[in-house]
Every structure is written in C-alpha cells, then in structure tokens.
Image (spheres, helix red, strand yellow):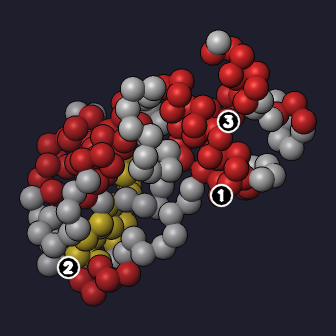
Amino acid sequence: MRTKTQTITPAKAAALLESNTSNRPLSRATVRVFAEAMKRGEWKTTHQGIAVDTNGLLVDGQHRLAAIVEADLPVKRTVFTEVSPDSFDVLDTGKKRNAADVLAIEGEKNTLLLAAMLRTVWLYDNRPDTSWSGGALVSPTTRYWRRSRQTPGSANTSVSLSNWSARRA
C-alpha cells in the first residue's frame, strides 16, 4: 500500500469516481454536507482520504470525491493506492463520533442532553422551516456550542432554554 497527500481537483475527483463500481449507494445529503464544509474552508486533511485497490477500483472516498465535484474546488486529500481488494469489507465499520462524544472530549457534563438541546437550538436558529429529523449535525452543533460557551464545565456555559425562549418572544 502506498500513500500520498495530493490536491484533488474536481476533474480528478470525477475521474476517480468513474472507478466506483462496488460501493454503497451515494448519499446526496452527505455529499451536500461535505461540499458545504469545503466551501466554508472547514474541510481538513486527515488520514481518512481516498483509497484505490490494486485493481484500480475506488474502495473508499466516494462521498468526499463527489463533494469535491459538487463544491467545484480543489481539496487536499490523503490518497492510498495499491490497497488490497479484501480490505473493503472492513472499511467504514467503526462507530461514528457524534456531538455528545465531542462535548465529552471537551470536558462537558450531561453531554447527551446538552447535544440534543444544542441541536434543537441550532435547528431553530438556522433551519426553522425544514424537517428536524435525521443526522446528528456534529459540526454545526459543536460549532454552535463553541461560539456560545465561555469556560468548559462552568455554570456560565450552560445555554439557558428560558433565556433563549425569552429572546424569541
């Protein structure tokens, strides 16, 4: 297996997607979320990149590549080549980090309740006319929290629903 960090242009992403023959169905919602993050400059280069097996087939990264095409921006990605074809069965099988996990890592308490409350406030402020069911909104929820808090774990950091409700009245 070889690895290299590369800037993936929309044209290169489209070419790599042509070798996407045996992946799960593409989620347009996930592509949209990734593309919006790329446009805002929030997309980070990590070890989670693009993987192509020894047969030249895309085995990981279809949503990232589709987002690069949708955002119409070049994005730096870690690219793995010469990946064993039988590694596909174990890709993307780990637990996805949610907003409560991020808040716990940052030292907050009662993170399940806090994450749910923050998600509700964020949705009310940012998407009042859309369905509120679905994904965890990890990035918007934690970004919202980071902007509104002062000191982790202090009484001053709690977002008061009564104060929030009063602002809306």
> Foreground residue, 132 or 147?
132
Q: Earlier in the sequence, mark 2 or mark 1?
A: 2
> Foreground residue, 132 or 15?
132
Q: CA distance from mark 3 to mark 2?
A: 43 Å
Residue shown at the point (54%, 47%) measured from the top left: 138
Counting from the top left corner in percent of width and height, residue 169 is at 65, 12
The residue labelled by disc 2 is: 54
Q: Quadrant of residue 122 in the image? A: top right
Counting from the top left corner in percent of width and height, residue 67 is at 27, 44
Q: Secondary structure at mark 3?
A: helix
**Pointer 1 with pointer 3, Cβ within 8 A:** no
Q: Quadrant of residue 89 in the image? A: bottom left
Q: Is residue 111 above or below residue 59?
A: above
Question: Mark 3 belongs to which amino acid?
Answer: Trp
Residue shown at the point (50%, 50%) measured from the top left: 136
**Pointer 2 with pointer 1, Cβ within 8 A:** no
Residue shown at the point (52%, 70%) measured from the top left: 95
Question: Mark 1 belongs to which amino acid?
Answer: Asp
Left or right of 157? Residue 121 is left
Q: Can you name the residue that lies furthest to the right here? A: 155
The numbered disc on residue 101 is 1
Badge 1: how crowded within 10 Å, few (<14), some, or many (20+)?
some
The numbered disc on residue 87 is none
The numbered disc on residue 145 is 3
Residue shown at the point (26%, 53%) measured from the top left: 27
